[in-house]
Amino acid sequence: MPDLTGYLCEQCLDAPAVAFVPAPGGGEMGVCTACGGLAPASPCVQHPLAQAHSPVFSRQGTRVAVTCGRCGVCWATTAARWLAELERRRTVAGTSAPEEA
Ligand SMILES: [Zn+2]
Ligand SMILES: [Zn+2]
């Protein structure tokens, strides 16, 4: 399955891309379910990284398999994106904590 995490549909630029199709000018492009005429592969059009959990790093350490907290499907992202998400969660947790004593 192609990794389209974070990509927008190149046809409508309005929805997350979920599949690659041959592009008119050659090569391929990512399209959303509507533009590609595809049925969603899972309950999530795109699993939210913010709700992912149970990370399992690949042997090379470049990919991370995570479980979607919304639909329960196991999907993969890059280690860089996952580490950035962890950093984001840490930042959010730190700044949203009540400051007033
Ligand atoms: Zn589209
Ligand atoms: Zn999901």
Image (spheres, rainbow, N blue to C red):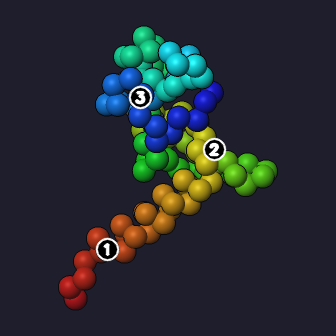
Distance (Cα) linking label 3 and label 1: 33 Å
Q: Nearer the viewer, mark 2 or mark 3?
A: 3
Query: Could you tell me which residue is drawn at 41 percent across and 34 percent down?
Result: 8
Q: Which mark is residue 95?
A: 1
- Callout 2 environment at 10 Å: few (<14), some (14 to 19), or many (20+)? some
Query: Could you tell me which residue is drawn at 52 percent across and 19 percent down?
Result: 25
Label 3 within 8 A of ligand 1 by Cβ:
yes
**Extreme-left residue of the structure:** 100
Query: Could you tell me which residue is drawn at 46 percent across and 47 percent down?
Result: 49
Q: Which mark is residue 9?
A: 3
Q: Nearer the viewer, residue 14 or 75?
A: 14
Answer above or below: position of 97 versus 41: below
The amino acid marked with disc number 3 is Cys
Residue 69 appears at what percent x and percent y? 46, 43
Residue that carries the numbered disc 2 in the rendered image: 65
Distance (Cα) linking label 2 and label 1: 28 Å
Q: Is residue 18 visible?
A: no
